[in-house]
Amino acid sequence: MKRKYAAVLTLVLAMGMTACSPDRKEEAAAIDTIAEPEVTATEESREEVMEDTKEYAAFEETVEADPITGIVESYADNTIIIKDPGDEILYYFSTKDAQIVEGDPPIAVGDKVEITYRGMLGDEKNPGEAVKIVADIVK
């Protein structure tokens, strides 16, 4: 019985020493210090990324977004500014190439309009591109 305990104890000590040996720490340190390979972009891969970016931008500009409804704040110089009554945010749209569907009187400040636009919503300096503007006169 004593021999079995001695054999088990020796085995446990041997396993413990193997698991905690200095050689394992050096291996672990060596693994930690392995440098990541440096990735450099070739001219060909840069061109592919640029081409993909251009295709995505062209796609994004041709996609019509869901219409947005708001009250006209300003309508002049091929630009219409509307305010969403729910969140009080101003939206800027270019009307240069838009199909405009007006009632008997033309669109004026205070009218409710629905604008279908293409691409992204714009801002004061770069208004979004309106595709269709439908007036719903509120008076």
Image (tube, grey):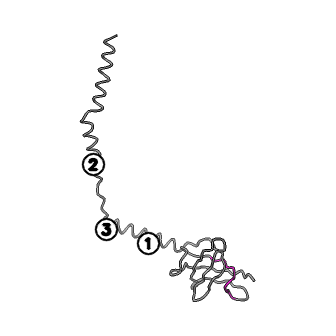
Q: Residues within 10 Å of mark 3 (few under 14, many from 20)?
A: few
Residue 31 lies, in percent from the top left, at 28, 44
Q: Which residues are magenta?
A: 106-115
Q: Is residue 120 left or right of residue 112?
A: left
Q: Residue at x 28, y 25 (%)?
A: 14
Residue 113 lies, in percent from the top left, at 67, 79
Residue 54 shows which numbered tag? 1
Residue 94 lies, in percent from the top left, at 56, 82
Quadrant housing the C terminus: bottom right
- In terms of sequence position, does the residue under pointer 3 or pointer 1 come before the other? 3
Residue contact between numbered discs 3 and 2, judged by CB atoms under 8 Å: no
Q: Secondary structure at mark 1?
A: helix
Q: Which residue is mark 3?
A: 43
Residue contact between numbered discs 1 and 2, judged by CB atoms under 8 Å: no
Q: Secondary structure at mark 2?
A: loop
Q: Is residue 131 left or right of residue 36?
A: right
Q: Amino acid at mark 3?
A: Glu
Q: Residue at x 32, y 23 (%)?
A: 12
Q: Is residue 98 magenta?
A: no
Residue most extreme to the right = 139
Q: Which residue is mark 2?
A: 34
Quadrant housing the N terminus: top left
Cα distance in 3D space between marks 3 and 1: 16 Å
Cα distance in 3D space between marks 1 and 2: 37 Å
Residue most extreme to the top = 1
Camera-side residue: 20 or 137? 20
Residue 43 lies, in percent from the top left, at 31, 68
- Res 137 quadrant in image: bottom right
Q: Residue at x 29, y 57 (%)?
A: 38
Q: Amino acid at mark 2?
A: Ile
